[in-house]
Image: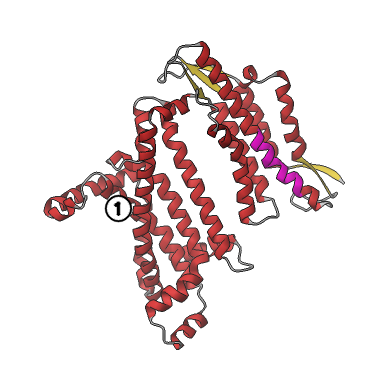
Amino acid sequence: MRLQVHPVLAVCALLGLGAAWLLPLLRVAPNRLMSGEPVYLASVLPGWGWSLVLPVFVLLIQPSSTGGTFNKQPPNAISSQLRVAALPLLMALGLASLFWLAATHAQQVAQTQSSLTRTSLGAGFWCLVALAWLMSLDAVQRLSASSTARSGVLALVAAPTLLLLALGVGKDLSLLKEYVNREEVFWLALLRHLQIVATAIVPSILLGLPLAWACTRRAGLRQWLFPLLNIVQTVPSIALFGLLMAPLAWLALQFPGLAKAGVSGVGLAPAVLALVLYSLLPIVRSGLAGLEQVPVAAKTAALAMGMSERQIFWQVQLPLALPVLLPGLRAAVVQTIGLTAVTALVGAGGLGSLMFDGLFSAANDLVLLGVLPIVLLAMLADALFKAMIAWVQPIGFSEADASATPLAQVSGRIR
């Protein structure tokens, strides 16, 4: 028996040490518009604090049989699983401790300096958070547990830090001050963001599924539909918004009823239309792959029972295609959540309005106030769809089978 080190985790740990030593944990500025002076982790961490990283390196090392590989199960599989599970829990405590150190220093600055002084989270803090999360993801992927259990472990990684936030720790950080100053605006922007996403995804599904079904009936349809949808994906979002503004403004002038319904060259209409166009490709492609995998015997039996084409689609084909359809819908939803931020440029609102307000005023923490909720929404949507995919998959059918192979086959046929 010999000792082995996981290469990915070892690289993340070394990068984390470099970020902690070389990059500033915080920046203290006289006001919200200036970058401020750097504050490094070494200056706020007690001397004995560096010993806390030793358990991480201990968990990176595990026994393995001679001549084996790291991915091969060691003789004591239970012990190996416990070591893997301990790493996300250690990352959870580390992130909470890191946030507590930053909040404590911000509190000291608030008590000793001007009320206009801002303490912002620095590049070192965000690098450490990202690396800790990557290490947790890698550890969770190696756990012999269900998808729901692994999602629960990842939720535990963020739980201690969220608990500190709920208890009011960190209120003197610049990011939290920006939130307090714009609390009402923030929640309105969040609701608007969700409204835009829902308004775009629902039509995409209602349009994409019939198109996928039509492609199964007429092979020639896909020969021009998919190249067209591929071209839409290559158009930058801002350019697509600009292309839609003039036609929608003309329609609003020609048809007053559309103008009364809210259709115009700016606002919700161009934003939703562009997002629908972007969402169609993953939905149609995954829908086609799923429908083509429905056994012919199932459709034949449904016809023999006297079911109509519509009944066969909704009651037989669509339920059987869900394991392949959901990964495409997952990609469309996550993509839409991110692209909705850009719709603020055409007056649609949402969290992107906070982000661009911060960019235009050079207030980095205001930018983060808009960006971080978008990232969290995308992660929550991704986790929700992963749970749904695991729930609808038949026994012995892996997520890779649903999300990779069929789509790759369809992509190959299209090309």
Taking 349 as reference, is 338 left or right? Answer: right
Question: Does 82 lie within the magenta span?
Answer: yes
Residue 147 occupies quadrant:
bottom right
Task: In this rendered view, identify the residue nearer to me: 87 or 342.
Answer: 87
Question: Could you tell me which secondary element the residue under label 1 belongs to?
Answer: helix
Residue 254, x across and y down, in percent: 12, 54
- Report whether residue 12 is seen: no
Residue 292, x across and y down, in percent: 48, 72
Residue at numbered disc 1: 273
Residue 227 occupies quadrant:
bottom left
| Residue at the outermost right position | 1
The residue located at (42%, 18%) in the rendering is: 34
Task: Give the number of marks.
Answer: 1
Task: In this rendered view, identify the residue nearer to me: 106 or 241.
Answer: 106
Taking 149 as reference, is 122 left or right? Answer: left
Task: In this rendered view, identify the residue nearer to me: 387 or 408.
Answer: 387
* Colour theme: secondary structure
Question: What is the magenta range?
Answer: 81-93
In the image, is residue 81 above or below residue 113? below
In the image, is residue 297 above or below residue 74? below
The residue located at (45%, 12%) in the rendering is: 114
Question: Does 396 lie within the magenta span?
Answer: no
Residue 154, x across and y down, in percent: 61, 45
| Residue at the outermost front position | 167
Of helix, strand and loop, which mostly describes the magenta segment? helix
- Report whether residue 44 is seen: yes
The residue located at (85%, 49%) in the rendering is: 66
